[in-house]
Image (cartoon, rainbow, N blue to C red):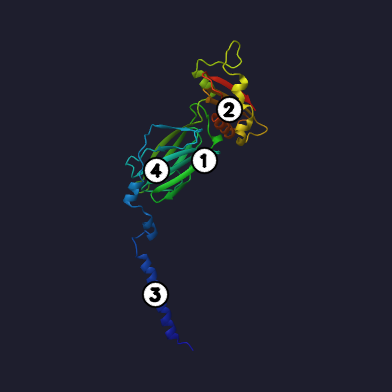
Amino acid sequence: MLDPLRLSSGLASLLLLALGACGGAAASGPAGASPAAAEEAPTESEIAQAQKPCGGSDEVHAHDLASGKATEAFAPCSKTGARDYSALVKIETLDEGVHIIIDATDDEVTLLGPDATQRDAVLVYPKGKGSVAVEVPLVKTRTGYRGDKIVLWDDLGKLTDDGTKIDVAIYDHDHSAQSTEEMHVSLAVSAGKSCEKAQDENMQTITMGAHGAKADLTDDQLGAPMHSSAFFSTCGLPDSANADICVAVKRGKPVGVSVALTPSNNRVAACIDRATRRLAFPMSEQLDVVHQKF
């Protein structure tokens, strides 16, 4: 038979050990801060190493949609300096649209809050300020945060000549100082010069087949690279759609391209535009114009 007094004494000892263990854990760090939170805090040297150069507030960065290369732009820094906030904004062309990536250095990241006035946020206006905004999802890193967002082709405006000016609005909220700053990065995205603008800029244009015009290439010779749709076969032109392509050509290279689709489809039009600008044409010193419909 068990001794009740001995059993009670043993249980009391176990209870005291458990309470001591809990008390020891609570007393192992500053009040209100967990060891995990302390480990996540970046050091001053890590923040300094992660800082980016400060970009200009009025600068517009041009991104060539047809180049296949990414464009990088530095955002304006916080008024208190790059240690408080600095960021690199990168934009690249994808089949779905334009991919915007942001890599920010921020000494205090605040991702919780009802709106951009109370938390860190990056909003993208695909057609410039005043257009409908899309928010970039942000993920905290050791020295700030990272975010990426694909802006779909159909959310963009004009794709040729001056193209569309995308506005990236960055809101930096410091909870400790109860302050919010707003910085902007402007990105002008364009597939390149349009066929019409190339003609307007070249006063020596000879329209193929015009009465009295003397061309050094026949229509068939000049249009040979576009006799079939094979050059844009991967673009997915629907069977129910029609494509009207205008190309201004000089010295064997497209210097202006315009693609009109019926019904409108920016994704397919942008793909055909890129494919057309990669074509090689017969050499000619003058500016010639090729029209092709599919």
The residue carrying mark 4 is: 172
Comes first in the chain, label 3 or label 2: 3
The amino acid on which the numbered mark 4 sits, given as a three-letter code, is: Asp
Residue 17's disc is 3
Whole-percent x, y for residue 140 in the image: 43, 50
- Pick the residue in front: 114 or 71: 71
Whole-percent x, y for residue 122 in the image: 45, 41
Q: In the rendered image of this protein, does residue 284 appear above or below residue 159?
A: above
Q: Quadrant of the C terminus?
A: top right
- Give how far apart the Cα atoms at labels 3 and 2 are: 78 Å
Comes first in the chain, label 1 or label 3: 3
User: Residue at 36% of width from left, 43% of height from top?
Assistant: 85
The residue carrying mark 2 is: 259
- Give how far apart the Cα atoms at labels 4 and 3 are: 47 Å
The amino acid on which the numbered mark 1 sits, given as a three-letter code, is: Ile
Numbered disc in front, either 4 or 1: 1
For residue 182, side relative to residue 242 (left or right):
left
Kindly indicate whether the residue at mark 2 contacts the one at mark 4 (C-beta within 8 angstroms).
no
Comes first in the chain, label 4 or label 2: 4
Q: Residues within 10 Å of mark 4 (few under 14, many from 20)?
A: many
Numbered disc in front, either 1 or 2: 2
The amino acid on which the numbered mark 3 sits, given as a three-letter code, is: Leu
Q: Residues within 10 Å of mark 3 (few under 14, many from 20)?
A: few
User: Residue at 60% of width from left, 22% of height from top?
Assistant: 221
Q: In the rendered image of this protein, does residue 138 appear above or below residue 27?
A: above
Comes first in the chain, label 4 or label 3: 3
The residue carrying mark 1 is: 150
Kindly indicate whether the residue at mark 3 contacts the one at mark 1 (C-beta within 8 angstroms).
no
- Give how far apart the Cα atoms at labels 1 and 3 are: 56 Å
